Image (spheres, grey):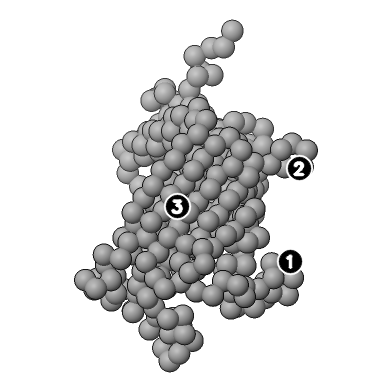
Amino acid sequence: MVGPAAEKPLVLFVDDEDSIRDLLARVFEKDGRFAVHMAADGEEGLQAVSKNDYSLVVTDLQMPKMGGLSFIRRVHQSHPNLPFIVFTGFGEMDDAIEALRLGALNFLRKPWDLGQIIPSIEKALASVERTARRQRVYGLIDSCNLTMTLPPRLFEKEAVIQHLTDPLVPMNLVSDTEVRNVYLALDEVLNNSIVYGALEIDAAVREGEGGYRTFQSLVEEREKNPDYRNRMVRVSADYNREEVTFQITDPGDGFDHKHLPDPTDPENLMKEHGRGLLLVQCFMDEVRFNRKGNEVILVKRRRSSSDGN
């Protein structure tokens, strides 16, 4: 029979300071709602993660033997969906930002107020549970179709791609690793559709005087320009248990897609021109363009067990 303690969320704290680990152990023992394990550094944390099913990991960033960033990267290799919160000290904000880029849900600055700890844990676990519920619903879907009208603003792109890729793993269309590749493929195509199609920016601007800075300034200028901001990008996605098809159409003049680099030639990966669309061809099972070149269709098919995935 499983006792009540087994039903508690299991949280791992990784910190090299004995006093902090002891203090946190007392705080959570008094609260009583969480089961807590402690590790003194990243190496101990890796061992703990390999033996236990944690709901959340809270780690310091500055530790001997293995620092927090290295620890997070190592854990994500085997547990890509394990959520993190990080502790960071004064002068460590660059590391904290990197931790957020690696997927950390939040960071707490040292010295922290003890009153922040448990609410931060509760908030993180609630976020994880909402995601889990959403993923379970996606797992019940047999087929669905959605369409979006996307304004030509690059900052909208990330949320759109996340929404498009969320159903893929629960529907068993792709693995955790493959979904990242689909994300990158969509990012490349949407970026091109917004920048070169809707905003009509010439790619040569990047190669000219001022380089990327001039290019980025022009993007920001045209995002606000009434002549461009209503030039919408149309996105549709059709999901079923065998494949997903994305269709992305921009209002631009299109491009010559008939002379893209050969995706089977490894040397083309080293060339800057056309590299993005080359990676799209590598990541997706099928890539098609309309005659004009302003519409892209991307297809990703479910791998059967006989495919070795």
Q: How many marks?
A: 3
The structure residue drawn at horizontal position 45% and vertical position 52%, both measured from the top left corner, is: 161
* Image position of 294 with respect to 30: above or below: below
**For the view shown, which residue lies furthest in the top direction?**
1
Residue 252: give x, y in percent of width and height. Answer: 39, 70
The residue indicated by pointer 2 is 307
* Image position of 215 with respect to 282: above or below: below
Amino acid marked by disc 3: Ile
Q: Which mark is residue 264?
A: 1
Q: Which mark is residue 161?
A: 3
On screen, residue 204 versus residue 251, left or right, reads right
Residue 269: give x, y in percent of width and height. Answer: 67, 72
Nearer mark to the viewer, of 3 and 1: 1
Q: Secondary structure at mark 2?
A: helix
Amino acid marked by disc 1: Thr
**Mark 2 / mark 1, whichever is N-terminal:** 1
